[in-house]
Image: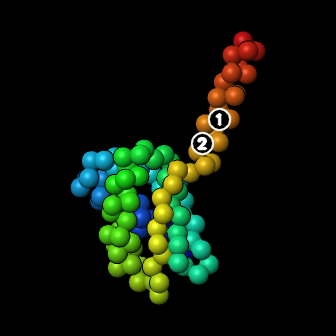
Amino acid sequence: MNQILREVISEELVRWADLDDRMGLLTVTGVEVTPDLREARVYLDSIRDVAREALDEHRAQIQASVNAQTRLKRTPRLTFSADPAIAQGSVVEEILRRRRREHE
């Protein structure tokens, strides 16, 4: 279910990016759906405040598209957030760069 939603939402975000410049290029890194299908957290590689605002404004339309394309019994309420793994990876990369510079 998570993968199906990830693909559908990714396609929708590309479509909305053409319609709303505030969204820019957003990459869906993952989706976590609750077992009862009431909510789905959509993780993005990064998310600026202006993009978050646009996503919040278009959330209902994106959900409607998800419903139309997946025909689920219940369409989860989407919430968007930055992927914490991306931020943690950036921190680790910076630490490794510093250590490499120290050894040189």
Q: Is residue 88 above or below residue 35?
A: above
Identity of the amino acid at label 2?
A: Ala
Residue 97 sits in which quadrant?
top right
Give the x, y percent position of residue 65.
34, 73
Q: Is residue 4 left or right of residue 102?
A: left
Residue drawn at 73 percent across, 15 percent down: 102
Q: Is residue 20 above or below residue 79?
A: above
Q: Which mark is residue 57?
A: none
Q: Is residue 6 visible?
A: yes
Identity of the amino acid at label 1?
A: Val
Outermost residue toward the bottom in this view: 73
At mark 1, the secondary structure is helix
Q: Which residue is mark 2?
A: 87
- Mark-to-mark CA distance, 1 and 2: 6 Å
Q: Is residue 39 above or below residue 14?
A: below
Q: Which mark is residue 91?
A: 1
Give the x, y percent position of residue 15.
29, 59
Residue 36 sits in which quadrant?
bottom right
Q: Are marks 1 and 2 in contact (CB under 8 Å)?
A: yes
Q: Is residue 72 above or below residue 89?
A: below
